[in-house]
Image (cartoon, rainbow, N blue to C red):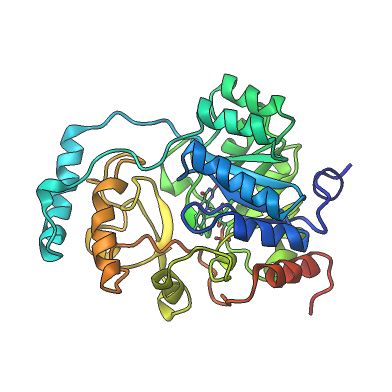
Amino acid sequence: MDLFSDTLSLAAPILQAPMAGSQGHALAAAVCAAGGLGALPAAMLTPEGLDAEITALRQHTQRPFNVNFFAHTVPQADAARLARWHAALTPYYQALGLDPAAMPQGAGRTPFNAQAAEVIEKHRPAVVSFHFGLPADELLARVKRTGALVWSSATTVDEARWLVQHGVDAVIAQGLEAGGHRGMFLTDDLTTQVGTMALLPQIVAAVNVPVIAAGGVADAAGIRAAQALGASAVQIGTAYLCTPQALTSAIHRTALQSEAARHTALTNLFSGRPARGIVNLVMRELGPMCDAAPAFPLATAAITPLRVAAEAKGSGDFSPLWSGQNASQLQDVSAEVLTQSFIDAWRGQSA
Ligand SMILES: Cc1cc2nc3c(=O)[nH]c(=O)nc-3n(C[C@H](O)[C@H](O)[C@H](O)COP(=O)(O)O)c2cc1C
């Protein structure tokens, strides 16, 4: 019994990566309509917002989909580090005419919790996936009791083994090329992070559940390579960012389709955790990795007003321009057409 073709009735195991802040139900619905697995990112939604998004998605598709959550531990605020962070941002506040004394604080993203579990119990999506490990046992048990398949990202072989020991139904092998946040959760040592081509076969050899390849897969050749390395499915993010169904901002789309997209880096400036984005002014000047940035997700609050002010002037200097390392062929074709081309590639029907 194949997880993807039998249990989820997919035309081919093409999974759209959940991308918090860059998409909602419209992209997920288009991918589902084409026969792939659409995903709804919940990390930046309130429980009410998530409920509304799932309801809207169900109005557009009868097919299975994935709802994705972050599973991080909320950190204690470290006053000294926050002060250093605010000091690092103050000159930019002044340059953009903002008041540094009004620099906001607080957490921008909430991990999976009891309220989110209630939404999952109400809607019972076919798949619930996590980034940054898994939630506490009791919360995970609530998800499993709904009958959902549970997946999570691994960035090392150790993380893949840990996830399987904790009961996941499939492991997402997230290679270093991937856009957005590294899903790393057993270590914060960036030297442990491995590219997809090396990570994928090692995880396939180490675990006895299906392995989903993520990171740098953006076209037919990448899909065939993932297949050859033992992937049971591919999860594709960046390639969907310029589709009309994504909510990617105009500034972000322009950057993705420019020469600038050839240079991405891991940066902690926008959230506190390493995430891959196109190198911009603030990454060049303060980072890309910066000791002063507070722990995830506490960095977001203070940098957001800079993003808003700069974007109002048409600049992405302070925006998280998330992108994987393979954004070379981004087109604004519809997500259905793109998904169909990925399905054809998986089936060996592409050129
Ligand atoms: C804009 C953007 C936002 C992302 N947000 C999430 C998210 O909310 N949850 C998650 O599990 N992964 C997220 N990711 C990572 C993807 O799941 C996946 O690992 C990555 O997109 C695969 O690499 P690719 O971008 O090269 O295709 C995001 C990626 C991007 C590009």
331 or 78: which is nearer to us?
331
267 or 252: which is nearer to us?
252
Q: Where does residue 347 sit, x and y in percent of width and height?
A: 84, 65
241 w.r.t. 171: above or below = below
Q: Where does residue 106 sit, x and y in percent of width and height?
A: 28, 38
Q: Residue furthest top?
A: 138
Where is the N terminus found, in terms of image quarters? Answer: top right
- Residue at 61 percent across and 26 percent down: it is 140
7 w.r.t. 72: above or below = below
Looking at the image, residue 133 sits to the left or right of residue 143; the answer is left
Q: Where does residue 163 sit, x and y in percent of width and height?
A: 62, 33
Q: How many marks?
A: 0
16 w.r.t. 118: above or below = below
- Residue at 43 percent across and 76 percent down: it is 254
- Residue at 24 percent across and 55 percent down: it is 305
Looking at the image, residue 88 sits to the left or right of residue 27; the answer is left
- Residue at 68 percent across and 62 percent down: it is 30
Q: Where does residue 302 sit, x and y in percent of width and height?
A: 24, 48
Q: Residue furthest right?
A: 1
62 w.r.t. 251: above or below = above
35 or 201: which is nearer to us?
35
Where is the C terminus found, in terms of image quarters? Answer: bottom right
Q: Is residue 56 visible?
A: yes
46 or 303: which is nearer to us?
46
Choose top left, top right, bottom left or bottom right for residue 29.
bottom right
Q: Is residue 212 visible?
A: no
